[in-house]
Image: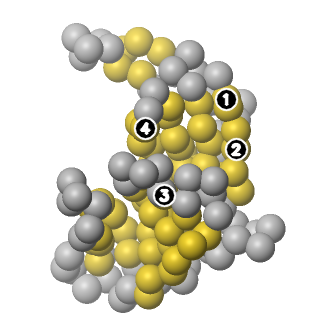
Amino acid sequence: QIISENFRYKSQFGKDTLHYPRDVKLYKDNIFILDQSNPYIHVFNRDLVLQKSVITRGDGQQVTYPWFFFIDKFGSILISDRGSNSILIFNSQFELVHKISVSDNPMGITMNKEDRVIVVCDAANNCI
């Protein structure tokens, strides 16, 4: 759902496209949505028109159970993958460039403002 600047309901979208939206990010006037059950990241423009859908599972990709994601200042996408206990890093063209193994059940993910430190919530071990 879209909430206006005065905290009122504005609109919603994606009922025909999304199946289990898990996480959402804004980046350069686009809305990126991680759709967990329909393994895609969907990219909508500011007018809520679907621009592209990129598969995150199967088709040679390595994501098995995506949970959250982060977009850095270069447009790289980092996905916490509970299925492979890893953080997967895709470039802005959605090509897998790196995989970082982490402990069980990586959940939320973020980076510092210099995009040098990755912070991951570890739900299984109750730590960051």
Q: What separation in Å lies between label 1 and label 3 (alpha carbons)?
A: 18 Å
Coloration mode: secondary structure
For marks 3 and 4, the one nearer the N-term is 4
Residue 39 visible? The answer is no
Q: Secondary structure at mark 4?
A: strand
What residue type is disc 2 on?
Answer: Ser
- Name the residue tied to disc 1: 50
Q: Secondary structure at mark 3?
A: strand
Q: What separation in Å lies between label 1 and label 4 (alpha carbons)?
A: 14 Å
Q: Residue at x 24, y 70 (%)?
A: 117
Q: What separation in Å lies between label 3 and label 2 (alpha carbons)?
A: 14 Å
Q: Residue at x 57, y 25 (%)?
A: 45
Q: Residue at x 63, y 53 (%)?
A: 93
For marks 2 and 4, the one nearer the N-term is 4
Residue 81 in percent (x, y) is at 50, 72
Judge depth for marks 1 and 3 and give the one in front.
3
For marks 1 and 4, the one nearer the N-term is 4
What residue type is disc 4 on?
Answer: Tyr
Residue 19 visible? The answer is yes
What residue type is disc 3 on?
Answer: Ile
- Mark 1 and mark 2 in contact (Cβ < 8 Å)? yes
